Amino acid sequence: MTSSSFSRVKRGLLGTMCVSALVLSVNSAPVSASRERARTLRIIKECSQYQGGAGEWCTITSSNVRQVPAGSRVLYSQAAGVPAGLLDSNVVLDAGNGNRAVGRCTVDTTTERGLCTFSDGTGRLAGFEARVDVIHVAGYDWKWDGAYSFNEGND
């Protein structure tokens, strides 16, 4: 076998292996992922009650997610500034009447940008998952933009 023939065989095998790996990864997606539908999340929260202390909160003033209406609160477990310039806290998204979701928010207080993720909840927020960018708008207002989903049966 010549060197060029051998190279063609190697490229052919490599291509077949890549396609096979792609097919396997697509076909082996978890069943729960196929039952979820990601949607766009747009929330504005007002944080005049939040001064960076543990146990303080922000209030949602507008939301495109019906399970998280205006008036819902975001409660922060840890204080901001540890380490300096950072808010890194467990959070509870409290939509009232036992409807809560748990997550974590990390915000760089110097750039006023961050990320919040939610992994589950109770009541109408059972199965709630979200990943949102946090952006300071002006004054006490902050924006959450991202994606959310519910496990099957909770949307």
Image: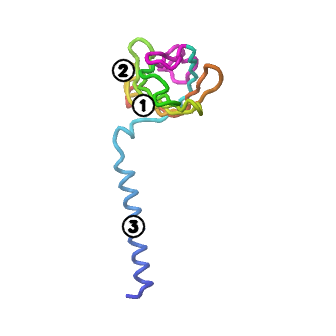
User: Which quadrant, please, contains the C terminus?
Assistant: top left
**Cα separation between marks 1 and 2:** 12 Å
Q: How is the image coloured?
A: rainbow
Q: Is residue 50 above or below residue 128?
A: above
Q: Position of residue 148 (x, y in %)?
A: 47, 32
Q: Is residue 39 visible?
A: no
Q: Of the two numbered discs 3 and 1 on the same chain, state the one appearing first in sequence.
A: 3
Q: Quadrant of residue 110?
A: top right
SS for tag 3? helix
Q: Nearer the viewer, mark 2 or mark 3?
A: 2
Q: Is residue 113 left or right of residue 121?
A: right
Front of the two marks 3 and 1 = 1
The x and y percentages for residue 131 are 48, 34
Marks 1 and 2 in Cβ contact (< 8 Å): no
Alpha carbons under labels 3 and 1: distance apart: 36 Å
Pointer 3 residue: 16
State the residue in front, 82 or 93: 82
Type of amino acid at the residue the image marks with label 1 = Glu
Alpha-carbon span between mark 2 and mark 3: 46 Å
Q: How many marks?
A: 3
Residue located farthest toward the bottom when viewing the structure as drawn: 2
Q: Which residue is mark 1?
A: 129
Residue at image coords 34%, 49% = 28
The magenta segment:
49-74
Residue 9 found in image quarter: bottom left
